[in-house]
């Protein structure tokens, strides 16, 4: 007997909604983990070959320990491990002679209020998102960072978006969205009406509209050299005429400071974690260890 289409279960409405929200969050977490697995597996294979490790479990354990030691996301560490030049096999250091720079200051209001910094990448991304939403006066937005292995942008922080939106835009390429255009042009992009703006591919447009957004503004997070290392975007429930000069200036300052901070983090904290990974690999070559 053929089964009918799935429908939400009967029962207390609030309890059902809470259970569905929990399940959707769990599914999103699983999808996020799955997306990072190929990169982590690639890093595991590289570590096994480089340090003569006995198995993939040991390679994962070394990645995990270096990740926890420096509070660097496992995917970020794996991405760095497979993309930077390999160390000299005879050297005890991965990056001998590396110059270290002081952590750059963050002067925008949300960064000061939250006392962010001190190598806390998660707190910095949260602060720049909060600052952006406060400046433009909306409760919907997200922060993306540049993917150094595949190009494009990946969502790292978001608020006010439904699960469908987050899943669809978990990774965006170089075309079909306003944030992709802002990254490509390294300039702020305002979409006054999502329903009519030609910047969007149709599937992206419909996903944004279903999420309750009719306008958006994207701001690239840039380094002093003009390189885009991420994006912060705000979404609005109604079409938007545009932002004021004062708003655009405030967004420029926060984005530039955050971009410089992220670049510092990549060349300092992430490289510190790689140095630690190199030390662990040299110390455990041939030995089997398990993850924590």
Image (cartoon, rainbow, N blue to C red):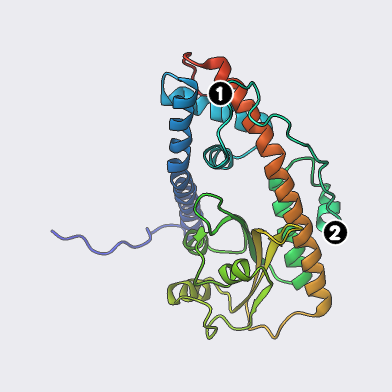
Front position in the image: 165 or 278: 278
Q: Which residue is mark 1?
A: 89
- Separation of marks 1 and 2 at Cα, in angstroms: 46 Å
Picture layout, residue 41 above or below residue 57: below
Residue 279 placement, left or right of 39? right
Image quadrant containing the C terminus = top right
Picture layout, residue 229 above or below residue 208: above
Residue 55 placement, left or right of 140? left
Q: Which residue is mark 2?
A: 109
Tell me which residue sits at (54%, 42%) in the image. 83
Tell me which residue sits at (74%, 46%) in the image. 264
- Tag 2, which secondary structure? helix
Front position in the image: 149 or 208: 149
Q: Position of residue 240 (x, y in %)?
A: 67, 83
- Tag 1, which secondary structure? loop
Judged by depth in the image, the label closer to the viewer, 1 or 2, is: 1
Residue at the limit of the structure toward the left, as seen here: 1
Residue at the limit of the structure toward the top, as seen here: 287
Q: Position of residue 186 (x, y in %)?
A: 66, 68
Q: Is residue 71 visible?
A: no
- The reply to whether dot 1 and dot 2 touch (C-beta < 8 Å) is no
Identify the mark nearer the N-term, 1 or 2.
1
Q: Position of residue 149 (x, y in %)?
A: 51, 49
Q: Position of residue 265 (x, y in %)?
A: 71, 44
Quarter of the view holding residue 38: top left
């Amino acid at each position: 007997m053929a089964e009918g289409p799935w429908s939400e279960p009967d029962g207390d409405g609030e309890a059902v909604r809470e259970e569905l929200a929990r399940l959707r969050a769990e599914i999103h977490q699983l999808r996020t983990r799955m997306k990072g697995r190929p990169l982590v597996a690639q890093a595991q294979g590289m570590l096994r070959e480089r340090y003569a490790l006995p198995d993939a479990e040991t390679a994962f354990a070394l990645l995990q320990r270096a990740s926890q030691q420096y509070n660097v996301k496992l995917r970020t560490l794996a991405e760095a491990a497979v993309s930077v030049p390999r160390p000299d096999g005879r050297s005890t250091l991965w990056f001998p002679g590396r110059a270290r720079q002081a952590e750059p200051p963050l002067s925008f209001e949300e960064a000061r209020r939250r006392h962010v910094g001190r190598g806390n990448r998660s707190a910095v991304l949260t602060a720049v998102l909060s600052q952006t939403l406060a400046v433009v006066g909306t409760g919907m937005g997200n922060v993306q960072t540049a993917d150094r292995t595949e190009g494009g942008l990946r969502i790292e922080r978001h608020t006010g978006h439904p699960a469908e939106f987050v899943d669809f835009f978990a990774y965006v390429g170089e075309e079909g969205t306003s944030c992709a255009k802002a990254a490509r042009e390294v300039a702020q992009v305002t979409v006054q009406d999502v329903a009519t703006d030609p910047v969007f591919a149709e599937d992206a447009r419909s996903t944004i509209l279903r999420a309750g957004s009719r306008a958006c503004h994207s701001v690239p997070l840039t380094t002093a050299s003009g390189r885009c290392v991420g994006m912060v975007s705000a979404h609005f429930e109604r079409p938007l005429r545009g932002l004021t000069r004062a708003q655009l200036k405030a967004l420029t300052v926060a984005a530039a400071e955050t971009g410089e901070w992220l670049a510092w983090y990549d060349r300092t904290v992430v490289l510190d974690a790689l140095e630690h990974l190199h030390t662990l690999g040299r110390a455990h070559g041939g030995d089997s260890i398990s993850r924590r």
